Image (tube, coloured by chain):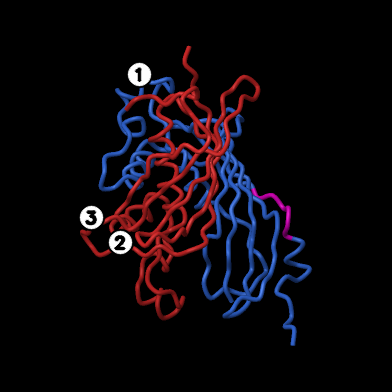
Chain colours: A blue, B red
Amino acid sequence: MAQESLITDEVKAAIGVEVVGPPELIEMKAIKDYARAINWPDPPNPLHVDEEYAKKTRFGGIIAPWSFYTSLGRGVPRQQLPLPPARVGMNGGNDYEFFLPIHPGDVITTRSKIVDITEREGRAGKLIFTVSERAFTNQNGEVVGIARGTGISQY
Amino acid sequence: MAQLFWDDIEVGMEIPPYRKAVTLMELNRFAGANEEFVLIHMDREYSRNVARLPDVIVMGNLKYAYLANMMTNWIGEDGTLKRLSAQYRGMDIPGPALSTEPTMICKGRVTKKYVQDGDHYIECEVWTETKEGQITTPGSAIAILPVKS
């Protein structure tokens, strides 16, 4: 017996709707904490934590690690899909493009949208795959990167 | 560290592996830094009994950061990472507290090198393996490298 799909017309209507988050100030400490966390217990690359060192590089100062982009826009509101609460949510994949480095003091605006939603019958129940896209723009209007991600919700 | 140059790249060349002993310490530090407070990465009881996972699991975003570390360590400061993708197909379980035995290892190899719009590109397949050799996170990377003058 086929169960009713969770992807209703209301859910489908949410695809492609862009949500613009409030601008976020990228603090030096956030970059340093992130760089330490992804290297722990090893020391981070000085490019991300040592201003004197970073000044002498082609970047002219500290930049965020490229993977720091996963932390952008996490606190900003995202679109709420009209789906029942999942039993567990998982990250299915990341695909990021990097255009420009992020420096401390940059102000980043995140524009997010859902680009695809699909449903599958898993071994233990329904699975919903949500593909979303986030574009990050700095205070100069430059797009510094684009993030595509797949979320997996288990029901 | 010596700078890597596009001239020295051959298709099939392996990226120096990047090993990590991942424990709850690494997960907790990353949870704070990435603002990623999710119970399946924090709470063993929840992971096992509610989420029905074997244990707490390593965040995909942390595995992503380790793959990025492998790439940037290798391509050096004059190399530029342009794209990195990773699919979280399998679970990585953190090792015991204070353990220094690697629980995961990032690997990769060059699949392509080419010039486009004056920039010198390489493409790589990258992945993470558990200490048992199971590939849990396949992915790919694109970078621009400097050329010898």
Is label 2 in contact with label 1 (beta carbons under 8 Å)?
no
User: Which residue is identified by label 2?
Assistant: B24
Q: Which mark is residue B100?
A: 3
Dot 2: chain letter: B
Quadrant holding the C terminus of chain A: bottom right
Apparent side of residue B115 relative to residue A29 in the rendered image (left or right): right
Specify the amino acid type for callout 2: Leu
For marks 3 and 2, give the one nearer the viewer.
3
Is label 3 in contact with label 1 (beta carbons under 8 Å)?
no
Determine the secondary structure under disc 2.
helix
Task: Give the spatial CA distance, label 3 vs label 2.
Answer: 12 Å
Residue that appears at 58% across and 61% down: A151
Q: Which mark is residue A154?
A: none
User: Which residue is identified by label 1?
Assistant: A56
Q: Quadrant of residue A30?
A: top left
User: Percent x, y for residue A96?
Assistant: 56, 43
Position of residue B140 relative to residue B137, above or below, is above
Does the magenta-highlighted stretch encompass residue A152?
no
Residue that appears at 38% across and 21% down: A57
Specify the amino acid type for callout 1: Lys
User: Percent x, y for residue B93?
Assistant: 37, 65
Instruction: Give the main secondary structure, helix, strand or loop, of the magenta stretch.
Output: loop
State the extent of the magenta-drawn residues as a range. Answer: A14-19
Dot 3: chain letter: B
